[in-house]
Image (tube, helix red, strand yellow):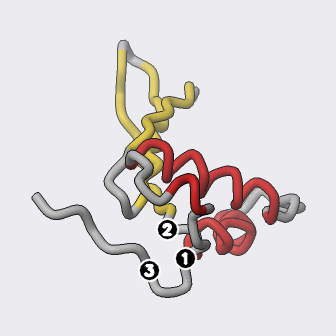
Amino acid sequence: MVPPSRPADAEPLPADLGHATPEQELTHALACFQAEVSPITAADLAEVVHSARPAFRSGIGWSAQLREQQGRSRLQVTVMHVAGARALQRVLGG
């Protein structure tokens, strides 16, 4: 499987990450995003998406699914990078 290409406007990797693993590229992209992200002032999806825009430029995307587990709803969020790395986060719900 060929890894997806990086977006043209993606944050460039430092020279020492030129041969980085997908996980290292994801870590770098998340660090770049964290340096740019603005605080979310309202708890709504539009505000979250607006604040997340710098992540898209760094090649980061995510998906979210609501799942049932042991009678409780859980939000499962997967963070992905164009290099192929994925990180799974589960958030407990009601």
Task: Work out which residue is located at the far front of the displayed protein and give it.
Answer: 15
**Few, some or many residues within 10 Å of mark 2 (<14, 14–19, 20+):** many
Q: Which residue is mark 2?
A: 59
**Few, some or many residues within 10 Å of mark 1 (<14, 14–19, 20+):** some
Res 67 quadrant in image:
top left
Name the mark on residue 10.
Answer: 1
- Verify CB contact (< 8 Å) between mark 2 and mark 3: yes
As drawn, 16 above or below 51: above
Q: Amino acid at mark 2?
A: Gly
The Cα–Cα distance between marks 2 and 1, rounded to whole angstroms, is 6 Å
* Disc 2, SS: loop
Is residue 65 among what the camera can see? no
- The residue lying at 87 percent from left, 59 percent from top is 39
Q: Which residue is mark 3?
A: 7
Q: Amino acid at mark 3?
A: Pro
Towards the viewer: 86 or 22: 22
- Verify CB contact (< 8 Å) between mark 1 and mark 3: yes
**N-term-proximal mark, 2 vs 1:** 1
Q: Amino acid at mark 1?
A: Ala
Looking at the picture, how far across and down is residue 82, in whole percent?
Answer: 38, 63
Res 38 quadrant in image:
bottom right
- The residue lying at 49 percent from left, 52 percent from top is 25
- Verify CB contact (< 8 Å) between mark 2 and mark 1: yes
Looking at the picture, how far across and down is residue 40, in whole percent?
Answer: 83, 60
The Cα–Cα distance between marks 2 and 3, rounded to whole angstroms, is 6 Å
Quarter of the picture containing the N terminus is bottom left
* Disc 3, SS: loop
